[in-house]
Image (cartoon, grey):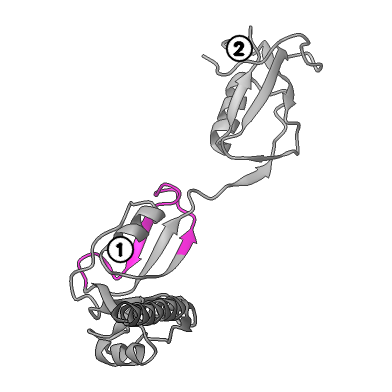
């Protein structure tokens, strides 16, 4: 008889344990929508999360020019996403605006400058690109606030490099080597004279043909191939391969 009673209670306990485990599995797999905690004090956020079966975890602090110190700056998961019951919502608290001096990012490339400022707790509000022959392309050439001033949201001016100047190719036909060199130097072009006569700047040679031709659109720094021939010849010298430079 005692054995039967013992087995009866054992079955009851197993049933209760099985039911409890089933209940826990169902409950823990249940998900709820995460509320928007940004701008709240941690105490208020904790109360709101506790009411729906979630926990609060502070994972760090960061500077922010808008959110007051001690209030929630960011959260994970984001508002509206789902989270399992009894899981934690991780938040970052605001330290308020940084009052340190503004560091200099002048000369840094844009990506490095933005990364540097973000690590310092500073936000880049906007970037403006302008042409400049004095700063390498992609580098920061000006910032606001200036280095040494009170730090805050930052605006950056970034170099696009020198502006590309384009114009129409002049007619070099009939020019001497010296004349052609003067014109190409003034226009910022790279002359390429044909072999055999490139080093002879006497009056007996002149440009007989060119590539690009007269009137073609060119840009500063572009190569212009100039074929030399006798000064009294109008036709180009055939079979001469152009090479760079003259002496």
Q: Does the segment drawn in magenta span residue 183?
A: no
Q: Position of residue 204 (x, y in %)?
A: 67, 10
Q: Position of residue 242 (x, y in %)?
A: 66, 16
Q: Position of 140 compared to 26: left or right? A: left
Vertical side of 242 occupied by 34: above or below: below
Residue under numbered circle 1: 117
Which element type, helix, strand or loop, lies under badge 1?
helix
Report crowding for label 2: few under 14, some 14 to 19, many 20 or more residues within 10 A (C-alpha). Answer: few
Q: Residue furthest front?
A: 1
Give the Cα separation between the discs numbered 2 and 1. Answer: 61 Å
Q: Which residues are magenta?
A: 128-149
Q: Position of 154 compared to 176: left or right? A: left
Residue sitting at x 65%, y 28%? 224
Label 2 or label 1, whichever lies nearer to me, is 1
Q: Would you say residue 179 is visible in this rendering?
A: no
Residue under numbered circle 2: 202
């Amino acid at each position: 008889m005692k054995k039967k009673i013992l087995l009866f209670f054992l079955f009851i306990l197993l049933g209760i344990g099985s039911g409890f485990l089933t209940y826990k599995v169902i409950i823990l797999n249940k998900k709820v929508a995460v509320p928007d905690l940004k701008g709240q004090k941690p105490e208020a956020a904790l109360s709101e999360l506790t009411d729906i079966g979630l926990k609060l975890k502070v994972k760090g602090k960061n500077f922010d020019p808008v959110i007051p110190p001690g209030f929630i700056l960011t959260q994970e998961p984001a508002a509206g996403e789902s989270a399992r019951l009894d899981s934690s919502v991780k938040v970052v608290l605001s330290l308020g605006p940084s009052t340190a001096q503004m560091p200099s990012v002048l000369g840094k490339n844009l990506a490095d400058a933005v990364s540097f400022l973000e690590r310092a707790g500073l936000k880049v509000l906007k970037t403006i690109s302008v042409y400049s022959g004095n700063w390498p392309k992609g580098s920061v050439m000006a910032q606001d606030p200036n280095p040494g001033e009170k730090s805050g949201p930052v605006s950056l001016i970034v170099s696009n490099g020198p502006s590309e100047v384009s114009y129409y190719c002049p007619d070099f036909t009939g020019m001497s080597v010296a004349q052609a060199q003067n014109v190409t130097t003034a226009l910022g072009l790279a002359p390429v004279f044909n072999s055999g006569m490139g080093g002879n700047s006497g009056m007996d040679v002149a440009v007989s043909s060119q590539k690009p031709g007269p009137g073609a659109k060119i840009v500063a720094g572009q190569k212009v191939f100039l074929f030399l021939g006798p000064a009294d010849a109008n036709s180009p010298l055939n079979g001469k391969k152009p090479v760079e430079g003259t002496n």
